Amino acid sequence: MGSRIMQLVIGNRIAECLSVDEKDRTPFLVGSVAPDAVFSFEEKNLSHFFVGEIQDYSRHADINGFLRKYSLLVKNKDPYILGYFAHLVADDIWLRGFYFSWLRNRMDADEGLYQLYHNDFWLLNGKLLDYYGFTEKLRKKLNHFPSIVDLEELKSEDVEKFIPYVLSDMEYDQEVLKEKLNVFTFNQILGYVETSVDMGIKNIKRIFS
């Protein structure tokens, strides 16, 4: 899946493009990272609404199942729920565009690639935040934890405990901006982010059309 910062950047771009009210911006951003607030494989399956199997390439995020289950909150345009939905859309794009198309195959073939992959994520935190230039704005938004609903798959207290990890991801040294990526290219990740923004916007608009 994409990193926490990728999801936060995607969420913020969607919120900007949809002109989400300032009072709703923080819960939307929290929702955009919330599914990653659990850590076990089983918990992540639930929080990401994953269905299907990895082995036969059928695994995907059941975004329509999420919309059906929380239809009342969606109908009321709950910003946390809409941000959460945007995360699921972006993760489904990652699964199809990165993981199944080539990344899984290469990690299976080369155990060392997993560490390089996560090191790239760490470098990309700074590179993406520097590129988009809204680090301080995001930090201010996340320094106040909003009131959000408990979901069956994810409790609000777990999300609140998770936000400091997201804030820590926003700390980076200027030197990382010069370091070379090993698995991905910056343009590749930028394309993923912007495609996820576009698909997130289209899917949210589709709900209310």
Image (cartoon, rainbow, N blue to C red):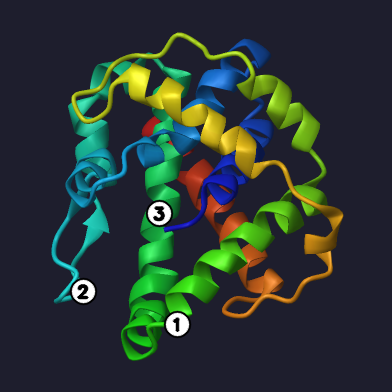
Question: Mark 1 and mark 3: span between their CA atoms?
Answer: 23 Å
Question: Mark 1 and mark 2: span between their CA atoms?
Answer: 23 Å
Front residue (pair 87, 146): 146
Front residue (pair 65, 55): 55
Q: Nearer the viewer, mark 1 or mark 3?
A: 1
Residue sitting at the far bottom: 109
The quadrant in which the C terminus is found is: top left
| Disc 3: CA contacts within 10 A as few (<14), some (14-19) or many (>=20) | many
Q: Say what amino acid the circle numbered 1 marks.
A: Gly
| Disc 1: CA contacts within 10 A as few (<14), some (14-19) or many (>=20) | few
Q: Say what amino acid the circle numbered 3 marks.
A: Asp
User: Which residue bears the numbered disc 3?
Assistant: 91
User: Which residue bears the numbered disc 2?
Assistant: 57
Please tell me whether residue 208 is drawn above or below residue 195 in the rendered image: above
> Contact, CB < 8 Å: mark 1 with mark 2?
no
Name the residue rendered at 62%, 43% in the picture: 169
